[in-house]
Image (tube, rainbow, N blue to C red):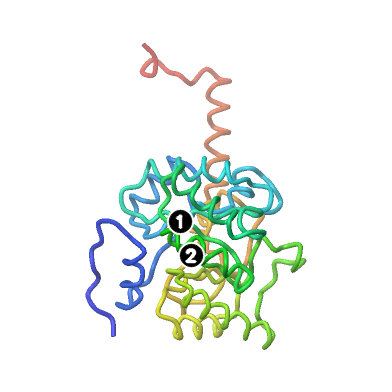
Amino acid sequence: MSTAKKDYKRITVKSLVEMKANGEKISMLTAYDYTMAKIVDGAGIDVILVGDSASNVMAGHETTLPITLDQMIYHASSVIRAIDRALVVVDLPFGSYQSDPKEALRSAIRIMKESGGHAVKLEGGKEVKESIKRILNAGVPVMGHLGLTPQSIYKFGTYTVRAKEEAEAKKLKEDALMLQKTGCFAIVLEKVPAKLAKEVAESLTIPIIGIGAGNGVDGQVLVTHDMLGMTHEFNPRFLRRYLDLYKEMTQAFEQYVTDVKSVDFPNENEQY
């Protein structure tokens, strides 16, 4: 049974667990720079993800793989300076945690010390268990990520829905339970069947944040540039565009060009 919504002045990892227990859904969006983070935080978003999706939307790469730890720290530092309320979770980029638990710990510590981030997120299940344990033992909160894991795109070969087959669904459920038992405070489930995601969310005490995982989970995350319609090439079923900024910004820029060329800008009231 849900209770009255609690007014959180600052969101912490404990807040998210409380929100799940109280039946309050968790809102999560991405941000990679100060200006966007300031707006997102001011709107009341619970969690801001400094995602390795910056590799796509900020740098124009085809995948999330090229972004470096130094670049993630730069983006996270910019976001942290804008935040008053939201919990800021920072992705550990590809290559910074998979090979060695000691390397994973060094990467997580760099993010926490150099950016001021509140938690880290990494992809995978039992294969990264030792890295997660090492990070948690240092006092760094960890968010897991299962289902479609974009850093493994060349292994999967496609961005299609994951865990549709029984064997993969079974492994996902086992990995989710393992992540909870190991100490993760939440898990992102990406692009998995809604029925499976609901089952996972109901079986665990930690929050499950979905992206393309239906409405039976504990919260939702989208890439901000996608939901604002700043990107237009990416059109998955799960994406709801709340604005069409691509069109509106293009019109504004075209109008600016016209006004400059015609000497309409600046007018007498816009000069000294």
Residues at discs 1 and 2 in contact (Cβ within 8 Å): yes
Q: Position of residue 266 (x, y in %)?
A: 45, 19
Residue depicted at 69% across the width and 85% down the height: 165
- Disc 2 marks a residue whose amino acid type is Met
Q: Is residue 247 left or right of residue 60?
A: left
Report how many numbered discs are placed on residues in the image. Answer: 2
Q: Residue beneath label 2, please? A: 143
Nearer to the camera, 56 or 242:
56
Q: CA distance from mark 1 to mark 2?
A: 8 Å
267 w.r.t. 45: above or below: above
Q: Is residue 107 left or right of residue 204?
A: right
Q: Residues within 10 Å of mark 2 (few under 14, many from 20)?
A: many
Residue depicted at 43% across the width and 40% down the height: 34
Residue depicted at 28% across the width and 56% down the height: 10
Q: Position of residue 24 (x, y in %)?
A: 33, 73
Nearer to the camera, 217 or 233:
217
Q: Residue beneath label 1, please? A: 89
Would you identify the image quadrant in which residue 151 lies? bottom right
Nearer to the camera, 270 or 150:
150
Residue depicted at 55% across the width and 67% down the height: 145
237 w.r.t. 202: above or below: above
SS state under label 2: strand
Q: Position of residue 29 (x, y in %)?
A: 46, 57
State which quarter of the image contains the C terminus. top left
Nearest to N terminus: mark 1 or mark 2? 1
Q: Residues within 10 Å of mark 1 (few under 14, many from 20)?
A: many
